Amino acid sequence: MIEVRSGTQYCGKDAAVFMQSLFDEFRDNYPGTYLYLRGDSGFAMPDLFDACEDNHCKYAIRLKENATLHKLVADLDAILYDRTKDNIIDYAEVFGEIDYQAGSWRQERRVVVKIEKPYGQLVPSSCASSVHEKDAGGYDPVTSDKVRRTHCP
């Protein structure tokens, strides 16, 4: 089904409903298929996270920066600053992960964090990706390294 929407609608509007139809199709027509969703921050919607989890779909969805995330990754910011204080020109990055639950989320989720200082800039920027579900041995088989390579370019 093709739907043309108004340019004034938020990109994540009804994304969970749309994805549910795809989850149903894959479950019915392609059982056993590994499902993985990658999205930008426009799709960081609680109902989409829930739909992915309810349908056993792994995901990496960029999160919007906010004061709480900044506070939780302050130690990474300090590491990046320490690594770059004598070289403010070259590109630098640092990775980490935290468990985080936004107020609108039904549960805590794993968040992989990338903080970078782009080439020639003095102010670091950050990118966060969420991948759900811890297994018995620690984290999900969609590893931090894989998320770093695929979602935090």
Image: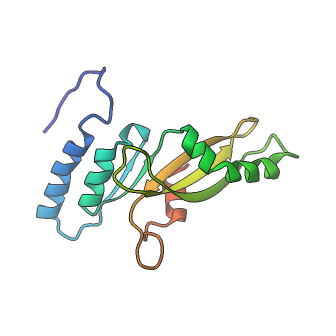
Instruction: Point out residue 37 in the picture as x, y percentages from the top left corner.
Output: 34, 53
Q: Is residue 137 above or below residue 57?
A: below
Q: On the image, which quarter does residue 95 sit in? A: bottom right
Q: Quadrant of the N terminus?
A: top left
Q: On the image, which quarter does residue 70 sit in? A: top right
Q: Residue at x 48, y 51 (%)?
A: 129
Q: Residue at x 37, y 43 (%)?
A: 104
The residue at the far right in this view is 86
The residue closer to the viewer here, 46 or 17, is 46
The residue at the far front in this view is 103
Q: On the image, which quarter does residue 71 sit in? A: top right
* Residue 68 shown left or right of residue 105 in the figure: right
Q: Residue at x 55, y 43 (%)?
A: 68
* Residue 45 shown left or right of residue 140 in the figure: left
The residue closer to the viewer here, 103 or 32, is 103
Q: Is residue 134 visible?
A: yes
Q: Residue at x 36, y 48 (%)?
A: 105
The residue closer to the viewer here, 128 or 105, is 105
Instruction: Point out residue 16 in the picture as x, y percentages from the top left corner.
Output: 24, 45
Picture colour scheme: rainbow
Instruction: Point out residue 5 in the picture as x, y percentages from the top left corner.
Output: 22, 26
Q: Is residue 93 visible?
A: no
